[in-house]
Image (spheres, rainbow, N blue to C red):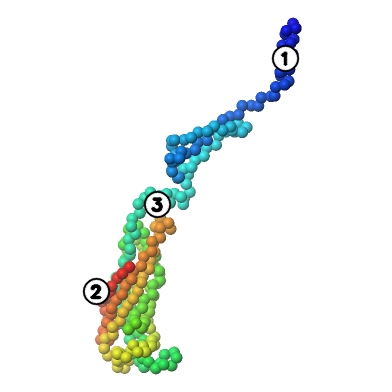
Amino acid sequence: MSMLAKTDSEVSSLTQSSPARSPRRAAYYVQSPSRDSHDGEKTTNSFHSSPLQSPMGSPPHSHSNSSLGPHSREVFLHALLPLPRPQKPSITIKSIKFDNFVIQAGADGSGVATSLVSMNSTVKLAFRNTATFFGVHVKPTPLDLSYSQLTLATGTIRKFYQSRKSQRLVSVMLEGSNIPLYGGGATLSSLNGAPVEAVSLKLNMMVRSRAYVLGKLVKPKFSNNAECWIVMDPKKMYVPISLKNKCTYTE
């Protein structure tokens, strides 16, 4: 009996001195991609696992690095998919028609006596978008018609949009009023305001356009330069003059 009492006493003492055991906490694993994986790619193997204790036995949380936002997906596709080389649009200047060309004596704005030129003409050109996958936005384009480095008339191509694999015919009016010639008009002779002989002129333009590929990720720009030598024949007024083989085109 003394041994049993002693045992009960020891058990009681141990019970009072030992702290209460807390509930066993659940363990969960966090998987992280190996160093060999790439950003943005879905990792399917080569994981490093490390056990962590979940507080209060909460369920494990899984994290995925394979979800990408819309912008990231576009960049990802742009990096993987080969893009076609942007196809440059082309221009062809067709003709010019002179409706008026008058030379008369006068003075410039400061009163200096000189010959003055007033004229208007119409230029027609073809714009072609050769691209298969995108349209192009054409910016407003100035044109000028000059004589002996003096600009006699100007005009502007209005902005427009050209869909893929299509073309259009564009008409532009060039006008000039009372343009002083100064020494440049010494060789020009006129009768009743009309030139007696043919007049050599030069037409210049630079057509700028832009395309948008993959939304606005790729925005190629294009420029088409043209320079044409024109002979204005006073006997051929109001008649379209063909400019085939009269123009030089550069980028």
Question: What residue type is disc 1 on?
Answer: Glu
Residue 36, located in which quarter of the rendered image? top left
Q: Nearer the viewer, residue 243 or 161?
A: 243
Helix, strand or loop under label 2: loop
Mark 3, residues whose alpha carbon is within 10 Å: few (<14), some, or many (≥20)? some
- Left/right placement of residue 92 relative to residue 138 reads left
Mark 1, residues whose alpha carbon is within 10 Å: few (<14), some, or many (≥20)? few
Residue under label 2: 245
Task: Report the residue at 74% width, 9% height from top.
Answer: 5
Q: Earlier in the sequence, mark 2 or mark 1?
A: 1
- Residue 87 vertical position relative to residue 59 in the rendered view, above or below: below
Residue 140 visible here: yes
- Residue 109 vertical position relative to residue 126 in the rendered view, above or below: below
Helix, strand or loop under label 1: helix
Residue that extends furthest to the left in the rendered view of this protein: 245
- Of the 4 image quadrants, the one containing the C terminus is bottom left
- Left/right placement of residue 133 relative to residue 4 reads left
The nearer-to-camera label among 3 and 1 is: 1
Task: Report the residue at 46% width, 50% height from top.
Answer: 72
Helix, strand or loop under label 3: helix
Q: Where's residue 168, x and y in %?
A: 33, 68
Residue 10 - label:
1
Task: Report the residue at 38% width, 79% height from top.
Answer: 154
Question: What residue type is disc 3 on?
Answer: His
Q: Where's residue 178, x and y in %?
A: 39, 87
Residue under label 3: 78
Task: Report the residue at 30% width, 93% height from top.
Answer: 191
The alpha-carbon separation of the residues under discs 3 and 1 comes to 77 Å
